[in-house]
Amino acid sequence: MYVTLGELRVPAKASLVPLVASFASRGAAALGLDEKDSDALGIAAEEVFSHLAACAAPGRDVVLRLDDGGWRAGLEVRFAAEPGRVDFRPFNLTFRTTPEEDPLLARTALAIASRMVDRFQLRRQDREILLTLTRERRFPKGEPPPPEPRPEGAVSARAARPHEIPLAAGLAAARHPAGQVLPAFGSPGTVSAMAAAGDLDAVVAADAAGRLAGALFFRPEGDRLVELLGPFLFQEPAVEGAARLLVDACLAALGRAGRTGVLARNPTDAIPPNALEPLGPLDLRGADGVVRRVHARFRQLDEDPGGIAHLHPRLEPFVREALRRLAFARTFRLLEGPAVPPGEGTAFATEIDRRNGQAHLKPLWLGADARATLDGLLAALSAEGLANPTAELDLGEPWHAGFAPALLDAGFEPRLVVPWAATGDVLLLQRTTEPSAR
Amino acid sequence: MTAWTLEPLVPEFVRQFEAYVPSRPDPELMALYGVPRLFRLNNNENPLGPPAAAQEVLRRFPPPRAAVYPSGDSFYLRRRLGAALGVDPEQVLVGNGANEAIGFVIKAFCQEGDNIVTADRTFAVYEWTARFSGIDARLVPLSDLGFDDEGMLARIDARTKVLFVCNPNNPTGTFWDRERLRRFVERVDGRAVVVVDEAYAEFVEDASYPDGLALLPDHPNVVVFRTFSKMWGLAGLRVGYLVGERKVVDTVRRTCTVYSVNGLAQEAALAALGDDGHVPATRLLVREEKAYLASELSAMGLTVNAREGPYVMVELPVSDTLAYRRLMAEGVMVRTMTGFRFPGWIRVSIGRHDAMEAFVGALRRALA
């Protein structure tokens, strides 16, 4: 459950920067962030708003909303940005503003802002730009829990009780590699706060006395999907059938949740065969800093209504095969005519998850300078230690198809298709710069 | 242009709720999946269609009549139903399908802070309608695939207003017998309205199956739902009704939408009731094809749950939603059951023999 602490609607003017910075930092402090974290959010807000006032949306009405997510404070910055009437280039993370009076003051405000927060998200939604800056509360790290006693008698799966969620997270973190658990799993306070905020939930397999055989965690992934983490089994050998019970209980819990599918980026080996369908490989960095090749899986929760996949011809064979394997019926529309419109103006929305060292690119606007813009972004991400960036193309958005040549030429490879992850299916591409520990 | 925020205008319980997306029309689906025909085995429709007399009404309906409003309260249909059921026509309320009647009842009896109680794995519309109305839906796990009377009674509190019992249950086909239903209603003891949804009543041949209407004289808090969508083959026209004690129905009537049942639907339903041969013919088809399905599916090593109702449940070794997509590519549409909280199961409606054969063949290939 998120609570909006406050909302500020102001025109993007340099004179209002102090007001915005104060709104963010004082609001964050009121939400329980310590001074350092509150100040960081304030600085990020200052950078973003200055940037909007200077070049990205000067004079436009901007709505800033501070949300209390319990374990994190989120500042959402939203303003109208009609395609064709707005130059999207300033939304590139690498966009540099250079004051006429002093070229030495050139700065990349969005990149600075992104460094001040744990999660930086920029996306275009209909006719708006949404920027979300998230700073997490710091909870103490917990001691690994002692091994869980083996269940006795029959084991059944059920929704985890509030006290069981941090316990199960700790047990999972103690027995599984960092790539399969969240960094937060080592912190009972964070896990409890995430669960209280509705950002993490779990089912457990337990006996009548509450001894845990295992757990399966899940959390919202975008507007349509749910991410699964696990299943984690707590004894050696594992309680027979516990993994299947966990998956079934989880799917039953999500059956009427209004979500389209579940995605497991890096399920454990305990996942029952045929429970989820394989999607493809990704190279992800775990909380321990090690990059691992993982094999994502997916399962639809509802009956597929069919859809349209807009494609660049260079991606057609991959996407067709990926969707055929999953038995998804799609009407394919191939990009016709020149892929790139004349004129510059390419912009990518960059999402950075510093906790996990991941960077993700989404199309924002396409111009003739797509490749050059992308190269600049990739260099900047690499300089920040963000290896193996991913990019996505929403196959439900016709204009995304035009980004394919630039991405492919820059070394991105198509990896997998996640059905219904956005307007339509999402093609995930990755550029591997750092080899994985397999 | 100023950024506009929709969220403050939307109640929290609506924000939490996702819209139901119905399947596309057959021509769209056939084009999408590249199949020349589609067997729809997902909605438990009557494969024989409406009774002959109702079909005749549909054929002869004078087009100019479409310009005239129907009876706002289904006057003649209620009178006919009253006579057939042995109740005062004022005890009958007709809706645009039984789904609408569910909404009428919840609106009539529930306000913010109230709750309804039903099973976790049953017809979803009780739960949905409550939730998108801002009413808490308390879900009691099924016990041995049947409604758990003790569990439901235990969940009743001072804010419980309606108990929904699907009898027989869709999708498991289990039912409470006469004695169990009566005992349950007695123990509720008037604390809440008990809705007995008998959408599939006409398919049940077991002598112990109760007629919920028999409870009305002693238990005025009972409301019975019936529909013309299943046995009577009029799903496309949307006609359902509820029957209860006069005071209860008068209260529900305050919240109902008049004129929601169209004139053609009223006349077809009226005609359907006069056809004595339709029910036995449908029962025979369902009985034979259900036995065929159970036998074929069991031979494939699959677990089958084939109890009451024109449908069976089948447990699959793969995800139900994957099987759905593979079956669609074979021109067969079934109901996935993750949404019923039975992941890995599908529900198959009983159809004519060619449809059943098509399904069995398609499933064999889908699981190969």
Image (cartoon, coloured by chain):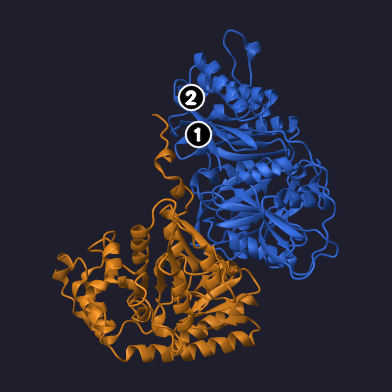
* A394 sits left or right of A144 in the view: left
> In the image, what residue occupies the spot 36% across and 88% down?
B279
- Residue type marked 2: Ala
Q: Quadrant of residue A270?
A: bottom right
Residue under mark 1: which chain is it in?
A
State the image coordinates of residue B264 (x, y, percent, origin top left). 22, 73
Spot the orange chain and give its letter. Answer: B
> In the image, what residue occupies the spot 70% across and 51% down?
A165
Element under disc 2: loop
State the image coordinates of residue B192 (x, y, percent, origin top left). 41, 65
Contact, mark 1 vs mark 2 (Cβ under 8 Å): yes
Q: Quadrant of residue B246?
A: bottom left
Q: Residues within 10 Å of mark 2 (few under 14, many from 20)?
A: many
Q: Quadrant of residue A11?
A: top left
Q: Which residue is mark 2?
A: A57
Measure the C-alpha gap from mark 1 to mark 2.
Answer: 10 Å
Q: Quadrant of the N terminus of chain A?
A: top right
What is chain A's hue in the picture? blue
- Residue type marked 1: Ile
Q: Nearer the viewer, residue B238 or B106?
A: B106
Q: Which mark is residue B135?
A: none
Reading the chain from its start, which is encountered first: label 1 or label 2? 2
Element under disc 1: strand
- Work out whether residue A366 can be spotted: no
Question: Does residue A204 sit above or below A116 in this rendering?
Answer: below
State the image coordinates of residue B166 (x, y, percent, origin top left). 45, 73
Q: Residues within 10 Å of mark 1 (few under 14, many from 20)?
A: many
Q: Which residue is mark 1?
A: A129
State the image coordinates of residue B138 (x, y, percent, origin top left). 51, 60
